[in-house]
């Protein structure tokens, strides 16, 4: 999907970010924990967890 729209290196990074984001979304949904608790577990803010739940891929890097 990304490979049709972006150069190979950029497409690969976007694909990895999308995979990571989907995994985090699945974990959040399956765990049933609050965004605040998930943020504490992941060492981030509740706002970042909200971004994950809304699929805001542009806000994330692989760093």
Image (spheres, grey):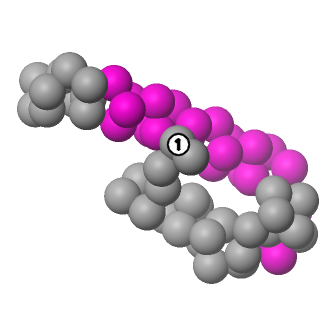
Q: Is residue 21 visible?
A: no
Residue position marked by numbered label 1 in the rendering: 62
Residue at the front extreme of this rendering: 63
- Name the residue at 43% across, 63% down: 59
In the depicted structure, whether residue 16 falls above or below residue 63: above
* Mark 1 nearby-residue class (10 Å; few <14, some 14–19, many ≥20): few
Asked which secondary structure carries label 1, the reply is loop
- Name the residue at 20% across, 21% down: 8
State the quadrant of the N terminus.
Answer: top left
Residue 23 belongs to magenta span = yes
Q: Residue 15 or 35: which is nearer the viewer? A: 15
Q: What residue range appears in magenta?
A: 12-36
Does residue 24 appear left or right of residue 27 in this picture? Answer: left
Q: Residue 52 or 12: which is nearer the viewer? A: 12
Q: Residue 6 or 23: which is nearer the viewer? A: 6
Q: Position of residue 12 (x, y in %)?
A: 33, 24
Does residue 37 appear left or right of residue 60 in this picture? Answer: right
- Name the residue at 41% across, 53% down: 57
Q: Is residue 53 visible?
A: yes
Does residue 8 appear left or right of residue 48 in this picture? Answer: left
Residue 29 belongs to magenta span = yes
Q: Position of residue 58 (x, y in %)?
A: 36, 58
Q: Position of residue 39 (x, y in %)?
A: 79, 68
Q: Residue 2 or 60: which is nearer the viewer? A: 60
- Name the residue at 73% across, 51% down: 29
- Residue 38: image quadrant is bottom right
Does residue 38 appear left or right of residue 51 in this picture? Answer: right
């Amino acid at each position: 999907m990304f490979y049709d729209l972006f150069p190979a290196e950029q497409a690969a990074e976007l694909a990895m970010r999308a995979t990571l984001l989907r995994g985090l979304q699945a974990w959040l949904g399956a765990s049933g924990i609050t965004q605040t608790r998930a943020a504490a577990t992941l060492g981030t803010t509740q706002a970042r967890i909200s971004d994950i739940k809304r699929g805001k891929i542009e806000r994330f890097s692989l760093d």
